[in-house]
Image: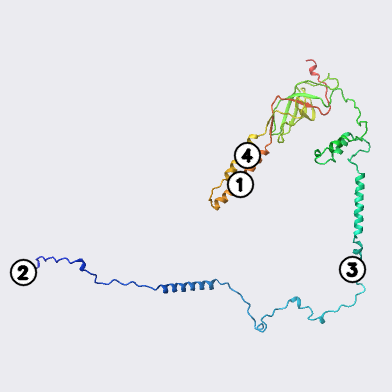
Amino acid sequence: MTDALTTEQPTMPTAKLDPETLSIRSRPPQAIRFRRGAIIGAAALGSASLIGVAWMALKPQVFRHAVQDSELSQPMAKSASDALSGVPTSYGDTPKLGPPLPGDLGRPILRARERAEAAAAPTPVDTAAAARQQRLADLKAARESGLMAQTTSSRGAAGPAGASAATLDTQPANPTATGTRKEQFASTRDASGDVNSGVVLAPMSPNSLLAGSVIAASLITGLNSDLPGMVTAQVTQNVFDTVTGNILLVPQGARLIGKYDSVVAFGQRRALVIWQRLILPDGSSVRLDNMPATDAAGYAGLVDKVDFHTWALLKGVAIATMVGVGSELSISGESDLVEAIRESAQSNTARAGDQITQRNLDIQPTITIRPGAPVRVLVTRDLILAPWRRNAGS
């Protein structure tokens, strides 16, 4: 009982110690230090070892010829060539040539050839004489030659046109540079004679429309030179014979059939039209053999409206210019890749611009002739027609 009471009594708290009086009783572990020189030496040794191993591993192999036992006494000896094995070893072993055979003609042939070459070689005197004779011959030919080349036939039937054509063929390519051509043309003489070779021919029929006559008509169908095609016209005036002017040959209302040329050159304003057939009101027809069409004034071809496609050309030039300007712009400090891309784009766009402009230049002008335009048929060959009788009673 007493022991239990004594154990249950509370213990008295101890006083606090001053923190300054407290100290660590265990010593901290010391750090292990290595010498700097030893570390550097070990690193240098390892690096040198790696370099040596790499050098030996990457060293190329050198193949050497194994020295035979017989070559040890003569290390610098070289084997003789096979071509020298058959030659004589000394001058005494060389073969001796015998006397020339009776049929040996080599020396006489050589001497004859040398004498022929010496005889054929021209001397300076002969060369000067030949040159002098050539100059005299050229001077004589120049004096005897005429100023103009004239060609005439054996019968004297060539006309002035033939003589003029033969004369003009000898003129230079640019005769307008001097006045010599005009003087020669003015002094040209007709060598064909004063009498014309042609004779008077009687008309084959009184019902004829002679060459030079004109047939008035107007277009029924229009004309557009973008594509080739046919063209028709209607005769607007009665056409009478050429001799008397009283016989009606082509009545008003007859049809003309022709075609036009769709190939138009740059700057061309007139369309080329030719007539092929003449159809009369009764159904009969006559071939016209490609007689040309003229306007009301007699000028060859027909003219009305011309489209030179200038707007398309200007648009192509503007597009090419804008594309070229855009490709020429550059940015400072751009990389090599950007510069290469820009230069490639410049070359491609310049080529594309040139092609666009060239295609627009290749577009030919478009000539348009409206229906109802007046047109004329110029008769180039005599037409023999039957008199038109149907309109006599009307």
The reply to whether callout 2 and callout 3 are in contact (CB within 8 Å) is no
| Cα distance between the residues tagged 1 and 3 | 71 Å
Residue 40 in picture, x, y percent from top left:
43, 72
Counting from the top left corner in percent of width and height, residue 341 is at 57, 50
- In the rendered image, residue 181, in percent from the top left (x then y), is placed at 84, 38
In front of the other: label 2 or label 4?
Answer: 4
Disc 2 from disc 3: Cα separation:
167 Å
Q: Residue furthest left?
A: 2
Disc 1 and disc 3 in contact, CB within 8 angstroms: no
What residue did someone put label 4 on?
A: 317
Tag 4 or tag 3, which sits nearer the N-term? 3
Residue located at (90% from left, 64% from top): 118
377, above or below 335, in the image: above
Front residue of this view, candidates 70 and 240 = 70
Query: Disc 4 residue type?
Result: Val
Report if the CB atoms under discs 2 and 4 are less than 8 Å apart. no
Q: Which residue is mark 3?
A: 110
Question: Quadrant of residue 214 in the image?
Answer: top right
Q: Name the N-terminal-most of marks 1 and 3.
A: 3
SS for tag 2?
helix
